[in-house]
Image (tube, rainbow, N blue to C red):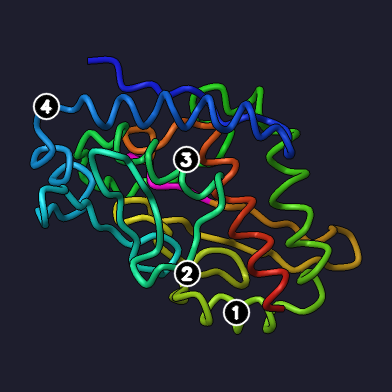
Amino acid sequence: MDRQESPQPARRGFDEAYQQAYQLASRRLKDTADLHALCRRSDATLAEEAGEKIISLDYLGRSCRVILPDVEASVTNGEPLSPRDKLIILHYLNTADGSPLTDRLITFKELPEGAVYYPTYVKRTIKPLLDKFADRPEALMVAAGDIGGIKAETGDFSFRLNPLPRVPLTFTLWLGDEELPPEGNILFDSSITGYLPTEDITVLCEILAWKLVRLG
C-alpha cells in the first residue's frame, strides 16, 4: 500500500500551498477505514466523545489531538498549532506503518531523496545549530534538556529526543580543533522512513533546530 504523502511546501509564506496539502492529508485521514489500526501503527490513542473521534498523541513534548470528522488538529490545552505542525502530525498519522525501531542510525543522505534535499536541509537545520552552539556546547545540552532531550553517546556532545512517538532523533556535535572546524549532524533510526516523508523530516528538524537556538 502506497503511504507517500504530498510533500511539505518548500518555501514559507505559501499559505495556499499549505492549505492544499493539509486538505489532501485531511481527506486521507478522514477516509481511513480502521482508525484503531492507524493509532496502533503510530502509537496514538483513539477515543470517542459526543459523536466525534479524537486521536491523541505527543508532538514536540505537547499533548496534541486531531478531532474527526472535521480533522481539527490542536494542542489538547487549546494552544494553537502552526500550519507546518498540523501538516507534520497528519502526515505522521497517515504514513505510520508500525515499523519497530531498528537501533540503526542513518544520516539524512541515506533517506529517500536525501541527497537531493541535503543542501537545503543543512542550511535550515545544521547551520543554525553550529552558528549558535559550536563554541557553546554546554548551552546546547541545557536547551536540549528543556525540551526533553536525553544525553546520548555519539560525538563530543549529543542528545536524543522524540518529537513524535516513534520518531527518535539524535543530535550530535563534534568540537573543532586547530585543523578541523566543528561539525554537527542529526541521526535517524532507519525506521523513520515508515513514519515521515523526507521533506517532512527536513521541516521537523528545522522546527527543532530553531527551538533549540531560541532556548540557547
Q: According to the image, label 2 marks what residue?
A: 153
Q: Amino acid at mark 4?
A: Ala
Q: Amino acid at mark 2?
A: Glu
Where's the C terminus, which quadrant? bottom right
Secondary element type, mark 1 = helix
Quadrant housing residue 35: top left
In the image, which is nearer the foreground, mark 4 or mark 2? Answer: 4
Q: Earlier in the sequence, mark 3 or mark 1?
A: 3
The span picked out in magenta is: 187-191
Secondary element type, mark 2 = loop
Q: According to the image, label 4 marks what residue?
A: 33
Q: Residue at x 64, y 28 (%)?
A: 16
**For the residue carrying disc 2, how many other residues have a C-alpha within 10 Å: few (<14), some (14-19), or many (20+)?**
few
Q: Residue at x 16, y 48 (%)?
A: 52
Q: Amino acid at mark 3?
A: Leu
Q: Earlier in the sequence, mark 3 or mark 4?
A: 4
Secondary element type, mark 3 = helix
Percent coordinates x, y for residue 24 in the rendering: 42, 23
Q: Earlier in the sequence, mark 4 or mark 2?
A: 4
Q: According to the image, label 3 marks what residue?
A: 87
Percent coordinates x, y for residue 179 in the rendering: 89, 60
Nearest to the observer: residue 144 or residue 30: 30
Q: Is residue 30 magenta?
A: no
Nearest to the observer: residue 107 or residue 95: 95
Give the alpha-carbon distance from disc 3 to disc 2, as whole Å.
32 Å
**For the residue carrying disc 4, how many other residues have a C-alpha within 10 Å: few (<14), some (14-19), or many (20+)?**
few
